[in-house]
Amino acid sequence: MLKIITHPNPILRQKSQPVTDVGVEKIQRLIPQMIDTMLVADGVGLAAPQIGENIRIVVIQFEGETYAMINPRIIKKSFAKEWGEEGCLSLPGLAGEVKRHKKIALEFTNEAGKKQILKAEAMLARIAQHEIDHLDGILFIDKAKKIRKFNTDE
Ligand code: NI
């Protein structure tokens, strides 16, 4: 399992660089390690800066599926937004309400180097927006209202 870095580590605040070659060993090794780390930590998503790498990779688990997204980009977003609760593995013990686009379309490269388009709404759209924010150095606490603390032993 990779070490998850936490706020206020400055790595979390840097803008991440695009991946230029998906096929290189470093990237091919990193993606399954990121997925394992997310699953073990019981998170719904993990972005590369959270494991100390300022590169544009996120992994997501949603309804039993895992996604690896390299250089993800939001290419469409609904005008409609909605509030919903978020937390973050890099901000243990904190949760808050964040307003996100209800529906988005994402473009990304998968681990096999193929360009993909994915339409997402509700929870999956929220997770993707949260993770892509990490690639630009943005944390949910920057956007949240009603930030609350909870006991992580629960
Ligand atoms: Ni996060």
Image (tube, helix red, strand yellow):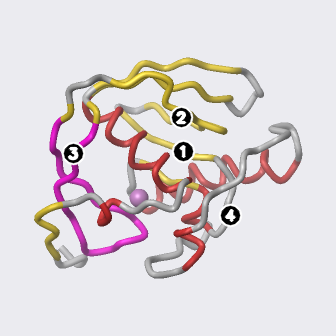
Name the residue tied to disc 1.
59
Question: Residue 69 appears at what percent x and percent y?
Answer: 60, 36
The tag on residue 99 is: 3
Q: Which residue is drawn at 88% across and 44% down?
A: 24
Label 1 environment density (alpha carbons within 10 Å; few <14, some 14–19, many ≥20):
many
Q: Earlier in the sequence, mark 2 or mark 3?
A: 2
Mark 2 surroundings within 10 Å by alpha-carbon count, few (fewer than 14), some (14 through 19), many (20 or more): some
Q: Which of marks 4 and 2 is nearer the N terminus?
A: 4
Which amino acid, mark 1? Val
Span of residues in magenta: 82-100
Dot 3 amino acid type: Lys
Ligand 1 image-quadrant field: bottom left
In the figure, is residue 72 to the left or right of 79? Answer: right
Tell me what residue is drawn at x 44 percent, y 60 percent. 138
The Cα atoms of the two marked residues, 3 and 4, are separated by 27 Å
How far across and down, in percent of the image, does residue 106 sit? Answer: 50, 26
Place of residue 62 in the rendered image (x, y in percent of width and height, measured from the top left) = 38, 35
